Image: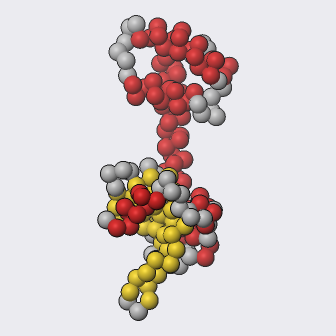
Amino acid sequence: TLPEAKRWLERIYLGYLLTKEYNENEINHILDYFNSPSINPGQIGSTSYVEMLKKSHKWVEDFNKKINNKIGREGKDHQTLYQSPQGYSLVKLLSEDSKKMEGKEMSNCIGTLHLKNPYIYSIRVENERVASLDIREKEGRFFTKEIKGFKNGQVSSLHWKGVRDCLFN
């Protein structure tokens, strides 16, 4: 879609800018829409700015619904316990569905072996899962059983500082 999108930007968007004020949020949504699998390249060229904006808003709305369904609902499925200034969050998984989704998204055993454990957490950056945390209780004391990254591997070195920040703050 790159050539079609470029032509649309040159023809339609630049013409629109001659009569209206620049809106960064609007054009960013349109650019995201251009990069989505939902776009039909053959329909880009003749679409007006207003119509493209409507299509991009619909796509963003549908995308956000998918994200919310994927992540679950705050309070019912999970509870955010800590949010770091760098965008990392410590999320307690409250429902079996949220643990199943964690296991599916992280390709780990959280969604199968640990459904009854009330101390399962997800560490996320901007709603993307980067680590799963399994806490256990024995004789009134809590301990970390596992901190796992994708596919039960180690947490990516890219995210380790953010994960550590969530755990110790």
Q: Residue furthest front?
A: 157
Using residue 27 as the reference point, say whether residue 44 is left or right of it: right
How far from the left and from the top, in percent, is residue 3?
64, 17
Q: Is residue 71 visible?
A: no
Q: Which residue is depicted at the point 68% across and 19% down?
A: 42
Q: Is residue 1 visible?
A: yes
Using residue 136 as the reference point, say whether residue 97 is left or right of it: right
Residue 112 found in image quarter: bottom right
81, 50: nearer the viewer: 81
Using residue 66 as the reference point, say whether residue 4 is left or right of it: right
Q: Which residue is depicted at the point 52% across and 31% down?
A: 32
61, 166: nearer the viewer: 166
How far from the left and from the top, in percent, is residue 29?
47, 30
Q: Is residue 38 above or below residue 128?
A: above
Q: Is residue 63 above or below residue 148?
A: above
Q: Residue furthest bottom?
A: 139
Q: Which residue is depicted at the point 40% across and 82% down?
A: 142
How far from the left and from the top, in percent, is residue 151?
63, 63
Residue 20 found in image quarter: top left
Q: Is residue 115 above or below residue 105?
A: below
Quadrant position of the N terminus in the picture: top right
